[in-house]
Amino acid sequence: MIQREQLEGPQKVTWCPGCGNFGILSALKKAVMKLDVKHENLVIVSGIGCSGKLPHYINLNCFHSLHGRAVPVATGVHLVNQDLKVFVHAGDGDCLGEGLGHLLHAARRNVDLAVFIHNNGVMGLTKGQFSPTAPLGYVSKTSPPPPGAPMKPVSVLGLAIGSGATFVARGFTARQEELADLMVEAFNHTGFAVLDIIQPCVTWNRKLTWSYYNERVYSLVEAGHDETDKMKAIERAEEGDDKIPLGILYREAAPDLSTGIALPEDGRLKDHETDLNALQEIIDRFII
Ligand SMILES: Cc1ncc(C[n+]2csc(CCOP(=O)(O)OP(=O)(O)O)c2C)c(N)n1
Ligand code: SF4
Ligand SMILES: [Mg+2]
C-alpha cells in the first residue's frame, strides 16, 4: 500500500488560494493510498494548464505533455507497459477543445486509462478565456460582449458515453471522500474511464462558483440511478444546467484495446536497458 509520505511532492504549489484544484490533489492522494498498486507502477500524464501542473505537486512517475495531447501520450505509455496503471489529468480546455478528437477516439478504442478532467469552464492558465464547457452566454474577458459565449457547452458526459467510454462519472472537488472513491472506481475499471471533476476557478470564473454548484448538484445514488442503463445515463447527462448529477452515470464490462494487441516480443518498454550515449546523440541532433 502506498503511504502518504511517499506522495509528498517537493515543489511549492502555485495554484491560487481557494482554487478547486487543491481538492482534486487531496482526493487523488486519498485514492492512490486505497489502491492495490505499487508506488512505482503508477504514472500520471498531464496536459498543459493549471490542471496540468498537478503532477508537480505529488510524488509519482509523470509525463507533463503538451496541450491537448495527454491522452495519446498516455495511450502509448500504457500499451507498451501494460503492468503500469496510467492515468491522465487534463483541463476542460485541453481535452475537450484541442484534444477532443483524442479523447473520443480513445473512448471508441476503450483504452485502459482513467482520465480525470479538471472542469472549470475556463482556460485558467491563459487568463480566463471561455472553454468548451462554458455555458451559453458566459461572459469572459475574451468572449464576445454581452450576451456572451454564442454557443452551447459540449456535453462532457454525453460525449464520453456516446463515444464508447465504459466508465463515465462526475465528481465535485468540494466532496473529497466521494471524489476519492470515484477515482478508485475509475482506476480499478478495465477500459476507458472518464471522470469529469467540477473544479471552481476562483480567479476567473465568477459564474461557476462553489455556491453555484452546491445549489445544483445531486447524488445519483440517492436518485436510485441504474449505472448499467445507457439510455438513462445519456438522459441524465443531458438534463440541463440546473441539475448536475454526481456519481457513476454509466459502467459496462467490455474488452479494452490491449486485448489482442501483442506486446513487443522483447518485453515491456520500461524493462529495456537505455543506452544513454545513443540517447544523447539523438538529443544532440536537435541542438544547434
Ligand atoms: C498546442 C498548444 N495550444 C495552446 C496552448 C496555450 N494554452 C496553454 S494552457 C491553455 C488553456 C488551458 O485551459 P484548460 O485546459 O481548461 O486548463 P486550466 O488552466 O483551466 O486548468 C492554452 C490554450 C499551448 N500551450 N499549446
Ligand atoms: S487561475 Fe483558476 S484554475 Fe488556475 S490556479 Fe487560479 S483559481 Fe485555479
Ligand atoms: Mg479549464
Image: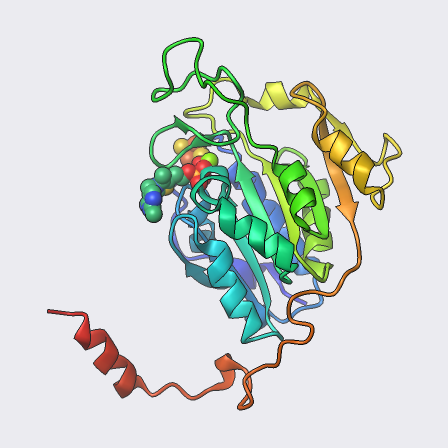
Location of ligand 1 given as a quarter of the image: top left
Q: How many marks?
A: 0
Quarter of the view holding residue 213: top right
* Residue located at (71% from left, 32% from top): 237
Residue at figure coordinates x 33%, y 35% from the top left:
126
Q: Is residue 283 left or right of residue 158?
A: left
For the point 54% across and 82% down, which residue is it?
Answer: 268
Q: Tell me if 191 is positioned left or right of 51 in this view.
A: right
Is residue 25 at least partly visible in the picture?
yes
Q: Position of residue 138 (x, y in %)?
A: 48, 17
The quarter of the picture where the N terminus appears is: bottom right
Q: Position of residue 99 (x, y in %)?
A: 46, 47
Residue 16 makes an appearance in the image: no
Comparing 225 with 263, the one in front is 263
Q: How is the image coloured?
A: rainbow
Q: Is residue 179 above or below residue 31?
A: above
Identity of the residue drawn at 82% across and 35% down? 232
Q: Quadrant of the C terminus?
A: bottom left
Residue that extends furthest to the left in the rendered view of this protein: 288
Q: Position of residue 198 (x, y in %)?
A: 59, 34
Q: Nearer the viewer, residue 135 or 108?
A: 108
Question: Does residue 270 lie above or below 131 as drawn?
Answer: below
Q: Tell me residue 119's x, y (percent).
A: 54, 36
In-image side of 190 versus 44 (left or right): right
**Residue at the top extreme of this rendering:** 146
Nearest the camera: 135 or 57? 135
